[in-house]
Structures are given as structure tokens and as C-alpha cells.
Image (cartoon, rainbow, N blue to C red):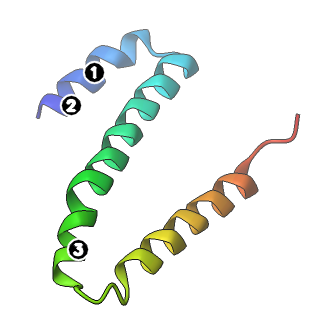
Amino acid sequence: MSGLVVWLIILGISSSVVVGVLMGIASGIIIILAIKELLPTAHRYDGSDALVTYSFKTGMLIVGIVLKLLERPK
């Protein structure tokens, strides 16, 4: 509900810069949560480290490739 209220407030003042900054902040929060909370928990359940590290690295590689493919030429 609060997200909807914030969205309505920002809708009136939004520009591409404001939206970009807000998306950057949101994605930074998600990455920090994944690294500080979810990754250690996953390592706790995968004692032999058979999948967690490789899956994490593969996911980051996929994200990097997609970002590079979506990059606009200058």
C-alpha cells in the first residue's frame, strides 16, 4: 500500500533521472540483502558448497551479459 502512495507522489514529479536513481537504490538494496542474508543461509544448507557459489556466480554472469546486450550504443 505504501508503495502505491509513493508511486503516486513520484508520478507527478518523475523524470527519467528520478526513476533511474530510485531504481538504482532499489536494486542496491536487493543486492545487499542477497549477499548479506541469503547467501550465508544458502551456504549453511549446502555444507559441501556444491551448488551455492557456482549458482551465484552464474547468475551474476547472466545479469552482466543481459545488461551488456541491452546497452544502447552511443
* Residue shown at 21% from the left, 31% from the top: 4
Mark 2 highlights which residue? 4
Q: Is residue 62 above or below residue 67?
A: below
Mark 1 highlights which residue? 8
Indicate the quadrant where residue 47 lies: bottom left
Mark 3 highlights which residue? 42
The amino acid sitting under disc 2 is Leu
Q: Is residue 23 above or below residue 51?
A: above
Q: Residues within 10 Å of mark 2 (few under 14, many from 20)?
A: few
The amino acid sitting under disc 3 is Ala
Select label 1 or label 3 by which is in front. Answer: 3
Indicate the quadrant where residue 2 lies: top left
* Residue shown at 57% from the left, 21% from the top: 16
Dot 1 falls on a residue whose secondary structure is helix
Q: Residue furthest left?
A: 1
Quarter of the picture containing the N terminus is top left
Q: Are the residues tagged 1 and 3 within 8 Å (C-beta)?
A: no
